Every structure is written in C-alpha cells, then in structure tokens.
Image (spheres, rainbow, N blue to C red):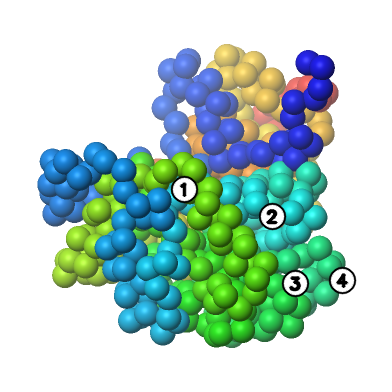
Amino acid sequence: MRQPLIRLGANELTYEIRGIVKKAEQLENIGYNILWENIGDPVQKNGQLPEWMKDIIAGLAKTNAAYSYCHSKGIPATRQFLADRNNNLHGAQITADDILFFNGLGDAIAKVYQFLEPTARIIGPSPAYSTHSSAEGAHANTKPITYKLDPENNWYPDLEDLYFKVKYNPHIVGILIINPDNPTGMVYPKEVLKRIVAIAEEFALFLISDEIYINVTYNGAEAFPLAQLIGDKVPGIGMKGISKELPWPGSRCGWCEFYNRKIDSEFDKLCSALENAKMIEVCSTKLPQMAIPLIMGDARYQPYRDNQNGSIGKRSKIIAEILKPVPQITFNETYGAFYNTIVFKPGTLTSAQHLHIDDERVEVILSQWLDETMNLDKQFVYYLLAAKRVCVVPISSFCSDLQGFRVTLLEEDEDILVDTFTRIRDGLLEYFESDKSMHSEKKPIKKVMS
C-alpha cells in the first residue's frame, strides 16, 4: 500500500476471552469435548429465558412495528420507561432525552472512546475488562491507563493509587467503574463510590459506570448505581443493557444514561457526538427495545431476578468449597456479576510446572501454543485446557500484572459445575506438584521461542 493502513492503536484491540476459543477448537477438532469457562453467556451454560418472557418477545415479533426503523436515540416509550424507573429507584432525575440506545454495550463502549481526543485518557480498573481497556488503548495509540483492584482487600479499588494517578496525569479526563466488576465479581461499596465521585469533582473529570450487571448481586450484597451517588456536580455516563440480566446476549441491546449533561460544555459535546453517530446509523436493534417495558414492568420480573441471583450465589459457594484445598491461590468470595478471578500467590508459579498429557496429538498442539516468553498464568491456562479440557482465561490478559485466571459462575447443571471445578482443582494441585522431581512423571512440553 502507498500508505500504512492501520493506526498504532489497533495493536491494543485484543480479546483473549474469545481468542482462546481458537485453541480450544483445535482440541474439539480431534474429538475432545471442552468445558467452556471463558465467556459470560448464560444461555450457553444451560440458562434459559422463562417462557413468559419468550411469549412477550414472540408476540412482539408478530407485529409489523418490530420490523421498521425506530427513533435514532431509541423508542421514546422505552426511554421514558427507563427514565421513570431510574428516577423512582435512585433519585437522580433524568429524562427520556438523556438515554441513548446502542447495539449492545460493546457498541456503546467503542463509540465513547472513539470520539475522545487521543490525548484524553480514561483510567479504568485492573484487572480490566478487555472491551474497555482495548478500546481505551486503541483510541490513545498506547497502553491503557489503570488503577489497581486489590485481591488482598476483597478486590476493592486502591483509592490512593487512583488518586495519585489522576493527580499527576493531566491527560486523564474520566474514571471508569465496572460495578459489579468483571472479571473479579467485586461490588463497589457505597463509601468507595462516594470517594471516586469526590476525586472526579476535585479534578473536573467525568465518570463512566458500566452497570451491565447492576441487578446481578447475591450473598447479601447490594450494588449502588452511579445515578444514586453522583450528585449534581459531576457529569457521568451509566452503561446498561439486557444481555446479562434477562439474559438475552444475542439481542445486542444496551443504552447509555447521561447524568448532569449540561453542567460541562465539553461533556455535553461528547454526548451530542454519540447521538449524532447513532443518527448516522439510523437506529439500534428495535425488537428488544420494544420488549424492555413489557418484561421489566411485569410483576414476575423481580421474583425471577431474585431467584436467579440466589442460584448464582449458591454456585459461588460450591466453587469456593471445591477450591478450598489449594493453598497456592488467593480466592475471594464474589458478590456480583458471574465471574471469579483466582490469583496465584507470588512465587508459586514456575516455568518448569506442567500437567501430564495422555495424547500425543494434544502434545503436538500444546507445543505450538507454548513459548518461553509467555506469562506463567497463560502457560497454566494452556496446560489446563490441554490436559483437563477446561477453557479459562489468564488474568494477565486483563491488563494486569497479577497472575491468575478468570472463571464463570454460570453453569446451571450442578453435575457439570462440580465436574468442571473438580478438574480445575485437580489440575492446580497436580501443576504445583509437577516441578518437584519426585512427583514428575514426564518432562514439560518443550516450548518454542516466540
């Protein structure tokens, strides 16, 4: 080409959650069944929409209106429903005009970062959720900026780390919160959120709160949405959707709520740019928008959500009990979303550790995955996939210096759930024993040089 085609930031667009699927499929192609713990799709883990929800959606699908364009910002009646719901529950007063629909939150996330100046940075939590961190790094043509979540303190944010990074980096214009958090399952305490709002006010920042899991809490936790705590001096964006809550991930239906839009002209320009971008696209996916008031306004909805949350909490306890015998990991109980990030304690991983592979074909495949420069948690994840057929995601791929892996709490078939985490536990115990020569039955797979 006469000119380079790809901007430097494209190198930051990575998504290990999906990327590892290509490796797992290599094992499927030679006849192995894989237990998928890499992605948060409730439907793929034996979850189902209740029949009454399906009936609502099916009825809407039979109407002619479901197949036409809708208002570019989203169906007015649905936006009004959501504004009223927000105002009744949280007190922050927004109108239907403060809500903008997207084709899923992935679309919203991409556009928010896309329209920022490349030098304007958003600081987000680490471990990071890849969609946010990749989009932030891509827009800035460099690595994302993060604040630490502390596994030794229930995964709560290190507020001192956040404060000083904001104070000494004038390029930071906003703070990202993911509440409840993906990938850790942490729910931000109210006092922590108030402090983050105060930091934003002190340094004239705006806030982004990804709240796709805001109604997915359990084990006694309550998630406080940004709308409830932001007050009237800080602008913010709340990101919400139905992909995890109903769950209907294939709907590709999410929305942004703009708080205190008019108190800052630059923030108002960003909101206008997002609205204009959606007008150019004409509109977002319509059928799920039509379904939102009918489903969320139904008397059966909250009992359904409560029951689902209770089931996730029960599964979190089962997983904690299975993994209890592994002393080399830091395990935090989860309270929201449906993930757990398990961290290896410092010094417990070595490059000599391995798992026995009983199929020469898998040995060949694994040797192609491994290299001498990879992070040690990724090495474990690849061995776990090859030896135990369980697909998890290394936490070093979540823009983190920690070593560990993320799992989900989604499997509704308890027998499969127990089998999956028993394999993980056994894999961990075998792996930690493998570099002790008296226990090693076989040498590690030879790694290639990258």
Q: Position of residue 133 (x, y in %)?
A: 66, 51
Which labelled disc corresponds to residue 168?
4
Amino acid at dot 4: Tyr
3 or 2: tag closer to the N-terminus: 2
3 or 1: tag closer to the N-terminus: 3
265 versus 46 height, above or below = below
For disc 3, the marked residue is: 162
For disc 1, the marked residue is: 279
Q: CA distance from mark 2 to mark 4?
A: 20 Å
Q: Nearer the viewer, mark 2 or mark 4?
A: 2
Whether residues under marks 3 and 4 lie with C-beta atoms below 8 angstroms apart, the answer is no
Whether residues under marks 2 and 1 lie with C-beta atoms below 8 angstroms apart, the answer is no
* Residue 165 lies in quadrant: bottom right
Q: CA distance from mark 4 to mark 1?
A: 38 Å
Q: Position of residue 412 (x, y in %)?
A: 31, 50
The residue at the point 24 percent across, 69 percent down is 302
3 or 4: tag closer to the N-terminus: 3
Q: Residues within 10 Å of mark 4 (few under 14, many from 20)?
A: few
For disc 2, the marked residue is: 116
2 or 1: tag closer to the N-terminus: 2
Find numbered disc 1 in the image and state the secondary structure of the residue it sits on: helix
4 or 1: tag closer to the N-terminus: 4
Question: Who is closer to the viewer here, 204 or 382?
Answer: 204
Q: Residues within 10 Å of mark 1 (few under 14, many from 20)?
A: some
Amino acid at dot 1: Met
Amino acid at dot 2: Leu
